[in-house]
Structures are given as structure tokens and as C-alpha cells.
Image: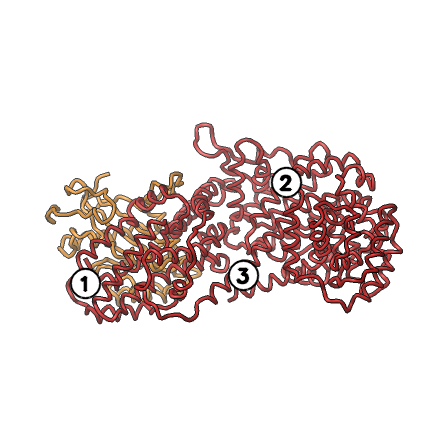
Amino acid sequence: MAKHKKQCGFFDGIIQSCVCVSRSFENHLTLKNFSESTSSSSSVTVVSNSTNGASKSDVNEDVPPAIPQKTKRKTADRQLSPYDNVPDEKIGGELLVTCEKHQSSHHSVSNSTSISSSMIETDGSKPPPLPPKKKHIMAYMEMFGNCTHTNDQEFMRHSVHMVQSQYSTPLTQTITAGGMSSTQSCSFSHSSHLSNYSSSSHSSATRLHGHAVLGVPPRSDDRSPSPVLPPSPLSTTSTGGSSDGPPPALPPKQRPRRPSARSPPPAAVPPPVPRPPPSVLGDGESKPSSPVVKSLPDLLEHTTKNDEQNSNKASPCEDLMEMLNVDEYLLLKKTDEDGPDIRGGHIDALIIQATKATKNGVFMYQEAFLTTYRTFITPYDLISKLMRRYNYFYYQPDKKPRSREAFALIVRVVSDLTSLDLDKELQLKLMNFVQQLISCGELTLAKALRVKLLQRHEAKEMLSKYTNIVTSLSLNARNFTLFDFKSEQIAEQMTLLDAELFMKIEIPEVLIWAQEQNEERSPNLTMFTEHFNKMSYWARTKILTAENKDTREKYFTKFIKIMKHLRKINNFNSYLALLSALDSAPVRRLEWQKQVQEGLKEYCALIDSSSSFRAYRQALAETQPPCIPYIGLVLQDLTFVHIGNPNLLPDGSINFSKRWQQFNIVENMKKFNKATYTFKRQEKIINFFQSFNDYIGEDAMWKLSETIKPRGGKKLGH
Amino acid sequence: MSYAYLFKYIIIGDTGVGKSCLLLQFTDKRFQPVHDLTIGVEFGARMITIDSKQIKLQIWDTAGQEAFRSITRSYYRGAAGALLVYDITRRETFNHLTTWLDDARQHSNSNMVIMLIGNKSDLESRREVKKEEGEAFAREHGLVFMETSAKTAANVEEAFINTAKEIYEKIQEGVFDINNEANGIKIGPQHSPTNPSLPGAGGSSGSQGSGCC
């Protein structure tokens, strides 16, 4: 419950924080959808022509700029504050006009303002054309999906080009025209308009929100926060929760900007550049200590100390993130040793090493780093440090690649964020960063990052929704008995349920569990284990509550048959759950036919614990996905690795060898987390399971067992 | 390595009482990296000598699997000895002893030797459970009792070895049926014709007379 609440709260937060974004997206989206029908890229003319209601409304607000927005200018566009109600045809006409003006010259400000304000007021009555936010986001994502760039790599490449090109032509409009691709140029000009617009448009109260937002995005340089998020909700929350640099800073910054905002937006971009790092840096600095401790108490306890140590002895941490070569802070394996190169090192050095994924041999390291970094640094701090590095090298033409590498890693980190990682703070931080990117003209990068961010957000949302569905499923229909279904089908349906829960488990949860057994931080894993236990108790109950010996045996045999199928389809989880039921003391001590008993032995062999489950491990190694492994063993391995290996090396740096071990263990699990089962879901059977909630307590089981066969009987089960 | 007997132990108790640390301290080795996951590593095994006989202790630690409680119970069964651990700085871990004990008694064979261990004796300043309380509980339930510190290693050896001694005595007395592997005792390879390396069900040390030692 608590979890859910949290999620909801979180979600609200996100929504709030996203409001501006989504709003801005809305324009974008509508535009996009719109344009999609015609063509993907943004041609000004197309947009203007379109008479689509939604698009119009959006356009109205932004009137002048509206057209180009599609690709690049998300922030600017979305401003449409009040969900865009569509104006009338005449609006369209005006739009056209404005657009034309737009194209011809940049100073449509006065016109646009007047238009927009009037429109809004008139629009009020119209039904909101836009679907609920979520849809917007989805639409937005779709649009991006259709967008020019298909994969991250391309983004990256583009980004590099952009960076370079921009750098070469550092200033203002020239960028738009020259450095940017055709699509981009449009958006840029648009943005400039917007900013002008916004600055001048303060007059109408209703509009204010939209305007503020509008104006902000383009220029927010160092302090992206303000623009992206309306200061009110976010700043308050963030400050309340824990340190948050940005919020407080925002208000002041915005003001100063405004005047300058006047200047063409592109021009504005470079100026902020000069000292973006400081701002980001500031954030990073302030956060690390408090939030870290808060969010990862056990995990980071030692690490934090060590970190301090390091900083004292080695060098100021900050410097490390700005260094090109950090090899001296890494502990490499000795030449005669086997295994991976990197054995340990200063946190920052490890991070920097992870940015060098393109280098030979670093790829696996990066994977291991991404899988395990949470055991020594929070996602928030990691991202902060990377941002700092990005910013630091951004302004050094010859070292741009370092900046790019840092960015690439940020994207990776973001795309691997779990639902729990993505809290308000982090969300805010990333939004701000996106904002910063936009204001620096790094639209492609901004897009790449934002897409990832939205995906994570979406995933999180889906998760909570899904959970609800699952729990609500189990109603009615209990006329069936286990014998009404084929063993094979039962096995398949059990597997579908398992798979559903298994897929939800996020690797970091597993790592965390092995270290601190915190149910709140490993919610999906907890659900999974609970499911396992329930299945087992459910099966015991079925057997023990059977009305007579024959039925009992029938159940016992049926479960064995089901296990046989479970084994066939590589569902070790349910297999073990049932086995643990048949093998449980209250069941096992009853007298069973020799035959039945012997049959069970064979099944037990699979999980014989000798040599640390050698039989099972071997079976697993020979298994091809899809498969659902027994996670208890993964947890046990991780627990031993955790207890048996120190977090830190004697010199206080991170013991990365331990992380390699953890990585290897969870990799094995990851492999199975991807493939899916294709059985058809049969509601009849699923309903029959009743989520396996129908079981009696252990005491009751014992009582039944002893009623069936009084204690003191000489025979043990065997 | 050859041994006369193999005793299986389990370590039970609440999460965080230091079960695995005790084991680690006793077996005196870091848990080795598991590079090839198909090769199981016996985490908690160590040879000791009792009555000039080599005895291999194989300690089964369910750490990490506690959440799968429906399955961990089944590990009790094949154990000759159990270390029931609580944390002297956390009263609740002491309060849960009864539950653990019931569990163990229900699921294991009745001859299992259970040693009660109050761990973390190095944290005297934070002690919440008096030593006398532990002693009283042990007396009441017929357990052997000891306070240990997995951190300083105080009494750790003794805890494991004393338990082994009790088991050994029971064997001498003929209380344990050493031919039934479900009792957690195996006769060493050189004492038995069967192949003990066979995992699980097949590995019973079989037909050989019990009188070998």
C-alpha cells in the first residue's frame, strides 16, 4: 500500500514537474501529429496551412513561431498554457499571416502577442482538443519515434556534429541558418520569436503562465530549473524533501534574463554557456552528501566515509571529474592475474572510466558499472557528476569528445533508471539539464535525453497500473477444481503469472536486497517471492484439505505432473514452489504410496543443495530462455559475495572486484529476464488460481497433518 | 579431503543477526568469486578434529533466501546440528526464538542438536538481552548456549565445535541413525562403499553397517 501511495505521490510530482514540459509538448505533439500526416519534417508552410483544431490552438498561442517548432523547439512550443482550445478559422488565417511574417523576419512580437491573448480569451468555450496528458506524452514519444533519429547512436553522432558545428559558429542567428540542419533552423527562428513574444506579453494575466514558461526555456542557461518547472510546486517540494539547489535559485535568475531575452534566442544560448558548469556543479555539490545518505543508508555507509577519505588524501573530488586521465586513480589487475582489468579505484575515476565505453575492453566494464554503481553512489550523484564533466569539457573545443562521452553515459544511466530511482529530485535535475541543453542549442541531445526520461517515466506509470490490474483480477469463478484442467495448461498458466512478475523485477532491486533486505526498495522482488510462497502454501493446502486419502494422492500426483511440465518449459520457480510444498514436513510426513514417494525423489534431486546446488546450476546453465530461474539462489550468491567481500579496498577506494562478482551473478539472471513466453492466457485457469491467496496457515496445516496421521507414528515420511 | 564423518549444520535466526558473518568467521575464508556459475562452491565447509577423527562440517546458511521461507524450511530436514542465532543488541531477535525453535523442531529430525547463540557480544554497550536470559531460555528448551562475537571471533570456534561434539557423542550413543542421510550425517568416503559425491537422493551412505567407528 505504502508503495502505491508513494508512487502516486511521486507521479503527481512528476506530473507537476512535467506540466510545463508536457504542456510545451502538447503543442509540439499536436503539431507533430498533425505534421505527421503530411510529412515528418517541419515545413513551415505545412503547419500554417493545416486547419486542424488542435494544431490551431497551439499555434494560436505561439502564433508566430508555431510552425517550425516541431522538431527542435519543444520547450518553446508547448507554452500554450490553457489546454489549447481551438480558435476558429480566422485564427488559422491569422496564423498563416503570422507565420509568413515569421519566415520573413523575426520581429513579429507585437502582432503575435496581441493575437494570442485575444485568442485565448475567445477560445475558452471550445472543447479541449487535447487528450489527457499521458496521451500527450505518448504521442510525443511516438512522434519522436517517427522522428529522424532512430537510435541513440545516431543521436550521439548527431550531437557531436552539432556541438562542433555550433562551436565553430558560436553566435546567434548564424547558428540557426548555418550550423543547424534545415529542420533545426526553423525551430530556432521560432524560438527567437517566442522569447520576444513572451517577454512582451506579460500583460494578459491568463497568459502569464504560458508566457513565463515560454520565455524561460530559450534562455535558461545555467539555471535551467526555473524555465522548465514552474517554481511553485517543484521548488517547494524539493526543498522540503532535501537539498535542492535549483529551486531557490530560479526566481532571481529568471528576472535578469528577461531583459536579455529580448535578444534573439540563439544568441542567448551562448551567453549562458560560459558558466553553466557552476550551476550544475552547485547542484551536484549540495546534493551528494545529504540525499545519498538518506536514500542508500546501508549501501553507502562505508562508501561515503571512504569517499571523504579519498577526497582528503587523493585529490579534490571535483578535480577528478575534470581530469582527462584518471588512470592513476584506478587499481588495475596485475599482469599475472586473471579476470577483468579494473579492480578498484576512486569513485570519480571509476565513473570516468565508464564513459570510455568505446575504448577496447571497456565495454564490459561499463556494463558492470551500470549494473552495480548503486552500491557505491546514488543515481542522482552519478548523474550530477557526469553533468559536471559534460559541462566542463563542453567549452573546450579540443576536448569535446570527453563531454560527449559523459553525455552518452548520462543517457545510458537514465535509460536504466528504475522506478524507484526516478524520484522527484532526479526528475527535476534531469529536466533542468534538458532545459540547459535546449538553451545551449543542443536540441538533438536534449531530445535524446528527454525521450529516455519520458520512457522511464512511462514505464513507471505502467508499472503501477499493471499492478492494479493484476490484483483486481482475482474475483469469482471457483467452481473448478485442479483436476478440471490439464497439467500442461496449468503449468503454462502458472508460468505466465510468474513471468509477469519476473519481468518486473529490476536488477538493482536484487542487488539491494542482498545487502539490506529492504522490502520497500525491492518491491517487485518482494512481490515475486511472496508469489512463490503463496504458490507453495496453496499447493500444501490443496493436499492437506483434501477430503480423503484418495483425493490427497490425486492431488499429490497432479502436482508432480504439473512439475514435470514446469520443468519442460524451464520454470524453475514454480517448480520449486510446488516441490517445496510436496516436500514440506506436514505433507511429507503423511504416508504416501511408494511409487509416489519415489517419483518425488527424482524431482528433489534437482535442488539438492550439495555443492551449492550443483545439480540445479548445471541444469540452469544448459537452459535456453525463456526461463524463470529460482531467484533465491541468486540472492544467496549475492549475499555471500556481499558479506565476504569488503566494499572498499584498504586504501579506501572502491573495491570493484566485488562489483564484478555481483555483475556476473545478476547477468545470469538478466539473460532470462528478456525472453518471453508465448502461451495464450486462459482466464479460466488464472481465475481458478485466485492469485494463490487461498491457503491456510502453517499451524492449521500441522493440525490437519496430525489429524490425518497422529504424531508419534514411527514412520517418517520416507 | 577425506573425513570420517560429515555433519550438516544449518544456521537460523532473524535477518541481520550475523548468521553469515559467523559462518564466514568460522570457515575463515572470503567467499570466493563464482566465475563459473555452474560450479557450485561450498561456502561453509571446514574440517575439524574430534577424538582424533577428521570431521567435515558443512554449514548450510540460508542467508539471502530467507524470503523464500516456504523453501528454506525444507533445509532443516537434512541437518544434524543447528545454530539458532539471535542478536544481543536487538531484543526482538530474542523474542522470535520460540518461533524459530518450533520451526526447526517441526521440520527437522528430533535428534538434531541445537545450539543457541547470542551474537554480537562485542557490542556490550548496546546489549538488550542479558546473558542470563539466554541461559535461561537454553535451559528451558534443552539447548546448549553460548555468546559469540563474529566480529572478534570470540567463542565462534567453540560454538561450532561444541555442537559437533554433541553430535559425535550422540552417534557414539547410537542415538543417530547414521545410515539415514536425512539425519544430516554422512560417513566419509573411505568408510563407505557408496559414492558420496552423488548429489542428493542417491547419495545415501547406504548399506554399510553402522559400526565402522
Mark 1 is on which residue type?
A: Glu
Q: Are marks 2 and 3 in contact (CB under 8 Å)?
A: no
Residue holding disc 3: A464
**Residue A714, image x, y percentages:** 15, 63
Rendered shade, chain B: orange
When the figure is inspected, residue A628 is found, relative to residue A90, above or below; the finding is above
Which tag, 2 or 1, sits closer to the chain's start? 2
**Residue A46, image x, y percentages:** 77, 49
Residue holding disc 1: A591
Report the front residue among A543 and B15. A543
Of all chains, the one bearing label 1 is A
Which tag, 2 or 3, sits closer to the chain's start? 2
**Residue A34, image x, y percentages:** 71, 53
Q: Secondary structure at mark 2?
A: helix
Q: Are the residues under marks 1 and 3 on the same chain? A: yes
Mark 3 is on which residue type?
A: Ser
Instruction: Quarter of the image for the N terminus of chain B: give it.
Output: top left
Q: Are the residues under marks 2 and 1 on the same chain? A: yes
Residue holding disc 2: A406
Q: What's the coloring here?
A: by chain
